[in-house]
Image (tube, rainbow, N blue to C red):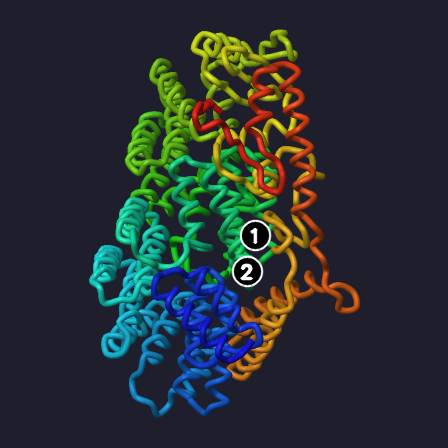
Amino acid sequence: MSEHDVMDLIEQARDAAGAGDWPRAYALLTEADTNGSLSGPDLALLGEVAYAAGRLDVTIDAWERAHAEGMRAGDHLAAAGAAVRVALHLLIDTALMAPIRGWVTRAERLLEGHGPTSAHAWLAVVRNYERLLSGDFESARQWARRAIELGTLCDPAAAAIGRVAEARGLILAGDVSHGVALLNEAAVAAISGELDPLSRGMVYCEVVCAFQALAQFDLAEEWTAAMERWCRGQSVGSIHGRCRVHRAEILRLRGASLEAEQEVLSACEELRPYIRREMGWPLTELGRIRLRRGDVRGAEDAFRAAHDVGWDAQPGLALVHLARGEVTLAVESIRDALGNAVYVPSKELPPHTELRRAPLLEAQVEIEVAAGDLAQARAAADDLSRVATLFESKALGASAALAHGRVALAEGDTATARRELEEAVHLWSEIGAPYETAVAQMELAHALRAAGNEAGALLELQAARSAFERVGAVHKVAEADRARGDAASTDVKGKGRAGSRPVPAVREAEAAKTTGENVFRREGDYWLVAYEGVVVRLRDVKGLRYLTRLLANPGRELHVLDLVAGERNGTADASPGLEGGTAVLLGDAGSLLDATAKAAYRRRLAEIDEDIEEARGLGDGERGAQSEAERDFLVRELARAVGLGGRDRSAGSASERARASVTRAVRQAMARISEHHPALGEHFGRAIRTGTYCAYLPDPRAPVAWRL
């Protein structure tokens, strides 16, 4: 490629970036950089565009190259600025503290003797987060103030991030009211017009992240909505990685479990290209989503995969034990988690804070009550109340009320149990969390029944059952039915076309015949299928589960690996499974490392080795232990990717295996449907598409509504 061609591509990329077309700008710059042609400001542009396009691995690589070029040219300020950007993105994208410290040290040396610059302001931002992730909130706040001061002089974006960082430090130190006020101010300032679109998007992201960490979901959603309104016609970069995990958390809270799982699977795909430690965060969220849907095996797979990449998978694993009835193991697991906290630096939820203990305490109450250790359960509930009060969080307050209600009910204090559980129902309902509200209603029903109020208990159980049904928590629906006294009726078998069926399903089938409603619902080992007034029942097979995912998303193409990952109750041979201790949830690209990624891992290892030596020289045992753990993690990742004789391990064609498996299963299910319901079989024959991407594409002129 000629120099003229390269310059033309770069100019086109600048125009695309100016218009906010980040994918096009990224494609043009990578084409121009085919032979390493970019340099100086163009490398900086690549770093910014790659970040906006969601290519975090390329972002860091571009800034590393810019640093090396600055060093070769003797331009210490340019080299320092690039070093700070490497440190910033390593912090945001990997939280590997040893490499971050190494790059910060390089930047500080290069900036010696220079006056205040943009690099100084961003260095203060990185120093703030490094201290925040280390639990040193006082030093973090001092660096935040420094970022604000320098940024006000040299870089408004650094000042804006500094204000958010100061607010987070105040919140984590317990000054919640002041911190929340500053967060709101920072978000308002972000739309004042002084920031570029990317910086504005970063500020908004940090604000939402802070509110979600605080369990202030209402404020997080308010600012998310405000950002989305402002973003119409604006360009703030792609929604990727962490943004998707935050979105999945909100979707889970609102009861949209299938949508939440889709978001978190996409996050796994997008976070995969670089250091995989951050994969633990979406994997634990995936586990939570699956657990509330009753998919205990799938939840355990996700939690164990998160643990394998160095993430703290508690209280998820303890709750898996409880769901399986392994109460003793659950008790041991949750007590160990509370007594031996795993130190995992995370910008989303920094360590050494009470916020990180809150979900552990919430789980401990449920587990200890199940084990009958009410003294331990009450102590945990009291501790949770203290945390909720400290952080002024309605969601944590709702959790604490539920915890106290559970303990009081187990102790036989029905009056206190009713009061606390009614408060939990009220708070969770105000927050807009249907699953949590229904759980509290179930406990309230037990308290009412214990006090002799059977009518009130049945009312709460029916409300809980309806909510569980809406959010797809089938196991909780069954629990509510048993509590209502329906266990006997739901166990009664009748004979029909496809074999035994529950009596309640008979009533539903008759209703479907009368109303003409289209139904495609699983009922234990059978499916109730109604279409155009004809009702049949089919024994469960995997293809029917794939079909219901397609019916739930009409007009949307779903990758076969998404279908397989979402279907966790089938046979092992059709699942991508877990490879090398890490979830291979989304395809060929994710499991193993390419040459660029392996080179990046080796650079990080060299930086970690330097940090270990420095920690030994300083006698800092805690820092050394942290760096050793990071080194072990990266060594495992490289070993997983490289086989005997240094040959790359191949992930194989997971996508092709899944395509064949899903296609076969769907076609078998459609053949079964055609046998028992020819009209529906004909409809599916026209509307179902299989392949690498599958879809349900009904005729838009005659849309079909399904009750699933």
Residue sitting at the far right: 645
Answer yes or no: is residue 81 visible.
yes
Residue at 49%, 47% in the rendered image: 264
- Answer few, some or many: residues within 10 Å of disc 2's Cα (few below 14, many 20 plus, some between 14 and 19): many
Which amino acid type corresponds to the residue marked 2 in the rendered image?
A: Arg
The numbered mark at residue 421 is: none
Give yes or no for contact between labels 1 and 2 (Cβ–Cβ under 8 Å).
no
Which residue is tagged 1? 306
Q: Relative to 227, say whether 324 is above or below.
A: above
Which residue is tagged 2? 277
Q: Quadrant of the N terminus?
A: bottom right
Residue at 61%, 15% in the rendered image: 678
Q: Helix, strand or loop at disc 2? A: helix
Residue nearer the viewer, 170 or 218: 218
Q: Position of residue 702 (x, y in %)?
A: 44, 23
Which amino acid type corresponds to the residue marked 1 in the rendered image?
A: Ala
Answer yes or no: is residue 389 visible.
no
Q: Position of residue 523 (x, y in %)?
A: 56, 20
Q: Earlier in the sequence, mark 1 or mark 2?
A: 2
